[in-house]
Image: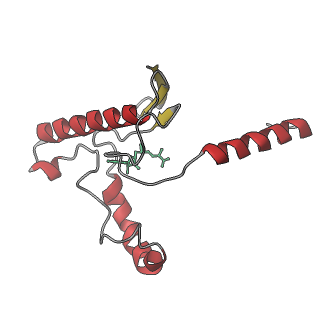
Amino acid sequence: MLDKPGQLLRAAALAQSYRDLHRPGRSSVEPLPYEKATFDAEIADPPYYDNISYSDLSDFFYVWLRRSVGHLYPEHFTPELTPKRAEIIAVAYRHDDDKEEARRAYEQMMEEALRESRRVLAPARPTALLEPLQRRLTCRVG
Ligand SMILES: C[S@@+](CC[C@H](N)C(=O)[O-])C[C@H]1O[C@@H](n2cnc3c(N)ncnc32)[C@H](O)[C@@H]1O
């Protein structure tokens, strides 16, 4: 809780500096649209196996958003449904109901995603990964 004017000013200055540093963007992780060693730190909250079917759930509201405001944001609403092929998820129905193949595909995509995130991180900089089941933050450097 910020209860003093000085704290508020410091918080505002910090927020401003983050705004200057922050580069909002939307992309698939593979590949990330950044040069090698661009970032000094990384925080990731990756999908976990078949915990949540993000794109299937998103389609529910995506189709309505596409119809109503899609023409304002054509760069986000070109496909009829949300992307599925590159989604990092372990769902068997995308692999002929083969659970083992779904698990293998998920782990391979996660490995590629982590390799790609390492590429855009400067050497010996920290990566913080949120572990979904325990909602725990794991931090690794180097
Ligand atoms: C655990 S959630 C993170 C949610 C995020 N922390 C938030 O508050 O919105 C994992 C996210 O990874 C996204 N995802 C799955 N495959 C991806 C991929 N290939 N590239 C980028 N994001 C992906 C999912 O759509 C989902 O939004």
Which of the image's four quarters has the N terminus? top right
Q: Is residue 42 left or right of residue 87?
A: right
Residue at far right of view: 5
Q: Residue 121: which quarter of the image? A: top left
Asked if residue 78 is positioned above or below residue 30 in the image, the reply reads below
Q: Position of residue 88 (x, y in %)?
A: 28, 45
Residue under the point 32% across and 38% down: 113
Asked if residue 116 is positioned above or below residue 84 in the image, the reply reads above
Can residue 118 be seen from the camera position used here? Answer: yes
Q: Position of residue 98 (x, y in %)?
A: 10, 43
Residue under the point 12% across and 48% down: 95
- Front residue of this view, candidates 101 and 28: 28
Can residue 4 be seen from the camera position used here? Answer: no
Residue under the point 27% across and 33% down: 111
Asked if residue 105 is positioned above or below residue 58 in the image, the reply reads above
Q: Is residue 58 left or right of residue 122?
A: left
Q: Is residue 96 left or right of residue 130?
A: left
Q: How many marks?
A: 0
- Front residue of this view, candidates 80 and 131: 80
Which of the image's four quarters has the C terminus? top left
Q: How is the image coloured?
A: secondary structure
- Front residue of this view, candidates 7 and 61: 7
Residue under the point 48% across and 23% down: 139
Q: Position of residue 19 (x, y in %)?
A: 66, 48
Q: Position of residue 96 (x, y in %)?
A: 8, 50
